Amino acid sequence: MPEIEFLNIFQGIATMLASDPHIAVARVVLIALGIAFVYWGVKGTLEPLIMIPMGIGMACVNAGVLFLSAKTMGTIFIDPIASEPAKLLDVLQIDFLQPIYTFTFSNGLIACLIFMGIGAISDVGYMLIAPVRCMFIAVMAELGTLLTFPIAVAMGLTYKEAAAIAMVGGADGPMVLYTSLMLSRDLFVPITIVAYLYLSLCYAGYPYLVRLLVPKHLRGIKMDQKSVPNVTAAEKITFSIITATVLCLLFPVAAPLFMSFFLGVIVRESGVKQYVEFLTGPVLYGSTFFLGLLLGVLFEANTILNPKVILLLFLGMTALLLSGIGGIIGGYIVYWTSGRTFNPVIGIAGVSCVPTTAKVAQKEAHDANKFAMILPWAMGACVSGVITSAIIAGIYVTVLQNHAP
């Protein structure tokens, strides 16, 4: 009977012991962090739609490292750098998540699918209640997207890398994924992970920012519900098709995102029940599930040990903080110019994490005054933020795509 060694059976432990100490420590930390993400997701502290699949992916990919040969270690989940057709065919036979990654993730398709779903749950009628105000707040809420770029360049990132991490300030995960794929493919995994880590914290962090910057008596301002106009489905469809066409004409590089979002909106307003159920169910939640799972699986110890990751974490936090501040400043400006009848808390909803920031705005207003209903205006600012972040992504990619690294 052949001699069987303990470590040959339990290769996850064997590779842990055979790895450099810093790799082994990083794996243990990421396993623990993945378990924590699942726990916080289940509790609702973090966004469960992303954190639960992402957490289990992180824990398992860092635990399931094996010897691929006598000299190499790896996993059988995903090979993100497989590019040659012959090599890719070999990988596809082993790495069970490789087809999903290759055909939906690495080319940005998953961002477009999620955008279709977001469009199908978004009511642009809220934006059309007060389009100028909503777009102004959304533009102000891009403060982090704009200011983080020069900060990142000053801290040593290239223009393309700086633009990719700056997009975290738009609080739009698919947009960050798309932009980083276009401009900084080598860093798109950590950048996208940073984006979704911080976007999930919008639930936890932005309420404190609102309370810090907006006093209670202003948070409790009631909006005039009678001033909300009735926007018809025909008006919403007309707005969507014209806006999508114009934006695609101006920024062709972001055309897939514009088309996907407004296609979802038009499907919603057209009343085609089968398509609405398809986009808001299997497409949106299926894509979100696999996005979280793939991000977790791609979050290996070697990824987190990239020296730029700490910098990206700092810049991502800076971008979202500045955008939140910018949105609230925009809310204050509208408050002052409206004769002090506009609730400035709506400004935080300009950060386009649909519908998270709109719900944060409504909750903070309700906590200050149980009769304050600001959700329609908050959703309008939130939907406007999706459009402005896509526009800025289009500008960044158009200007920098052919720029030297």
Image (cartoon, rainbow, N blue to C red):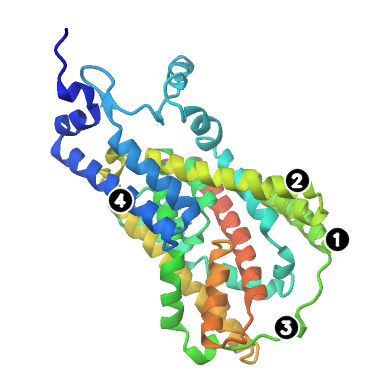
- Please state, as top left, top right, bottom left or bottom right, where the C terminus lies in the image: top left
| Residue type at tag 1 | Ala
Residue 156 location (% of width, % of height): 30, 52
Judge the density around disc 4: few (<14), some (14-19), many (≥20) Cα neighbours within 10 Å. Answer: some
Residue at label 4? Answer: 33
Q: CA distance from mark 2 to mark 1?
A: 18 Å
Residue at label 1? Answer: 234
| Residue type at tag 3 | Gln
In the picture, the disc for residue 225 is 3
Write the residue at 40% across / 55% down: 197
Residue lying farthest to the top in this orientation: 1
| Residue type at tag 2 | Tyr
Q: CA distance from mark 1 to mark 4?
A: 48 Å
Sequence-first disc among 4 and 3: 4
Sequence-first disc among 2 and 1: 1
Q: CA distance from mark 4 to mark 3?
A: 45 Å
Residue 358 location (% of width, % of height): 58, 70
| Residue type at tag 4 | Leu
Write the residue at 59% across / 73% down: 137
